[in-house]
Image (cartoon, rainbow, N blue to C red):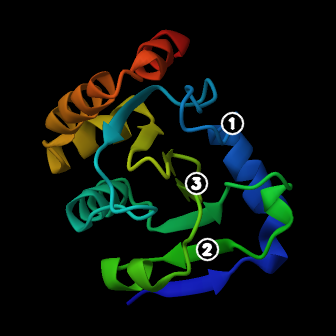
Amino acid sequence: MSEIIKAADNKVKIKEIWQTLFKTNDPFVYPFTDNVGEYLFFYPTEGYFLKKVQFEALIASAKEMDDTTLIISMVETDKDFFNTEEQYVCKNLEYDDYRRLPIHLENTIFSYNAMWGLLVSQEFHAIVGGSVGFVNILKKKYPGYSEDFTILKADWVEQGKADWIKKLKNQQ
């Protein structure tokens, strides 16, 4: 059963964890710090939400590493998003409960233990990063990651806007 807590009292801790994993909230550059060893893409997402298969692979990978608490932060704002009320600490989060959260902006979902994180873009992609061990587990749980990247690249090439993908690959 999911346990969801609006994180008003934990803003300092959430910011500290977020900054361990992320250096930016821009989904069109490499968003991760040096603490992240590997990354992959989920594509397409369902707007600001992961698809069920993506979410379940993420959660199963985290559970395999005994990591069942995550944080969701809305990050698409000009303000310091850590000072908003749009931060949630979730234990054993289930997909239906995730979909009921009031997520209406680009967001990050990340491990309370700073083992992994992802940034969900309004452009229907998510960049998922973590330790090499975590990402290897995720690749096994979600073998569609390779096809997701192929489709992502093709869609952006078709639009004539794939430069950000090439740059992102070089920024790691």
Residue at mark 1? 24
Left or right of 2? Residue 106 is right
Q: Residue at x 24, y 68 (%)?
A: 52
- Image height of 82 relative to 41, above or below: below
First in residue order: circle 1 vs circle 3: 1
Residue at mark 3? 113
Q: Residue at x 14, y 35 (%)?
A: 147
Mark 2 is surrounded, within 10 Å at the Cα level, by few (under 14), some (14 to 19) or many (20 or more) other residues, namely many
Q: Quadrant of residue 46?
A: bottom left
First in residue order: circle 1 vs circle 2: 1
Residue at mark 2? 89
Q: Nearer the viewer, mark 1 or mark 2?
A: 1
Asked if the residue at tag 3 contacts the one at tag 2, i.e. Cβ–Cβ closer than 8 Å, the answer is no
Q: Amino acid at mark 3?
A: Asn
- Image height of 101 relative to 27, above or below: below
Mark 3 is surrounded, within 10 Å at the Cα level, by few (under 14), some (14 to 19) or many (20 or more) other residues, namely few
- Image height of 89 relative to 49, above or below: below
Q: Residue at x 37, y 57 (%)?
A: 62
Q: CA distance from mark 1 to mark 3?
A: 19 Å
Residue farthest to the bottom? Answer: 1
- Under circle 2, the secondary element is strand
Residue 138, image x, y percentages: 27, 45
Q: Amino acid at mark 1?
A: Thr
Residue farthest to the front? Answer: 159
